[in-house]
Amino acid sequence: MLTAITKEGILLNLADTNGGLNELRKLRSTREYFCPACGSRVIMKLGEKKIWHFSHHGKVPCLTNSEVESLYHLQGKTSAL
């Protein structure tokens, strides 16, 4: 999932970030993020092999599809990353 929301209601979309890796690391360490669909806590993953994304904690699956855009559209948005 590319988007998550903070307790304050701020939506963060990792496909549209301009702050860079250091800014995202700072945000990750200072804020908690939640799934916009189910409200469960999620983790910001900033690896080098996969595109940056949010993941649900542990083995807690999200029963809803929080990405309202098609896979084709999301791939197009992230191809420039």
Image (cartoon, grey):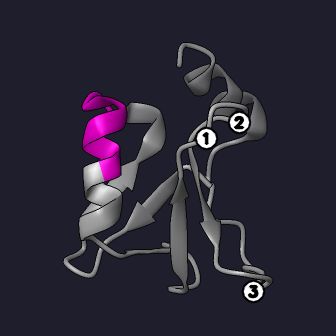
Q: Do the residues bearing badges 1 and 2 touch, measured as CB atoms within 8 Å?
A: yes
Q: Secondary structure at mark 3?
A: loop
Q: Amino acid at mark 2?
A: Lys
Q: Nearer the viewer, mark 1 or mark 3?
A: 1
Asked if 56 appears above or below 25 in the picture, the reply is below
Q: Which residue is mark 1?
A: 47
Which residue ends up furthest to the left in the rendered image?
8
* Magenta range: 17-25
Q: Secondary structure at mark 2?
A: loop
Task: Tell me how far mark 3 sits from mark 2, CA to CA.
Answer: 20 Å
Q: Residue at x 31, y 64 (%)?
A: 29
* Snapshot quadrant of residue 32: bottom left
Q: Amino acid at mark 3?
A: Val
Q: Residue at x 61, y 40 (%)?
A: 47
Say which of 59 and 69 sits in front: 59
Q: Which label belongs to residue 60?
A: 3
Task: Tell me how far mark 1 sits from mark 2, CA to CA.
Answer: 6 Å
The answer to whether residue 11 is magenta is no
Q: Nearer the viewer, mark 1 or mark 2?
A: 1
Q: Do the residues bearing badges 1 and 3 touch, measured as CB atoms within 8 Å?
A: no
Q: Earlier in the sequence, mark 1 or mark 3?
A: 1
Say which of 78 and 37 sits in front: 78
Q: Residue at x 76, y 38 (%)?
A: 71
Q: Earlier in the sequence, mark 3 or mark 2?
A: 2
Specify whether 26 is left or right of 42. Answer: left
Circle 3 crowding by C-alpha within 10 Å: few under 14, some 14–19, many from 20: few
Image location of residue 68, percent across then percent down? 61, 54
Q: Which residue is mark 2?
A: 50
* Snapshot quadrant of residue 55: bottom right
Q: Amino acid at mark 1?
A: Gly
Task: Tell me how far mark 1 sits from mark 3, CA to CA.
Answer: 21 Å
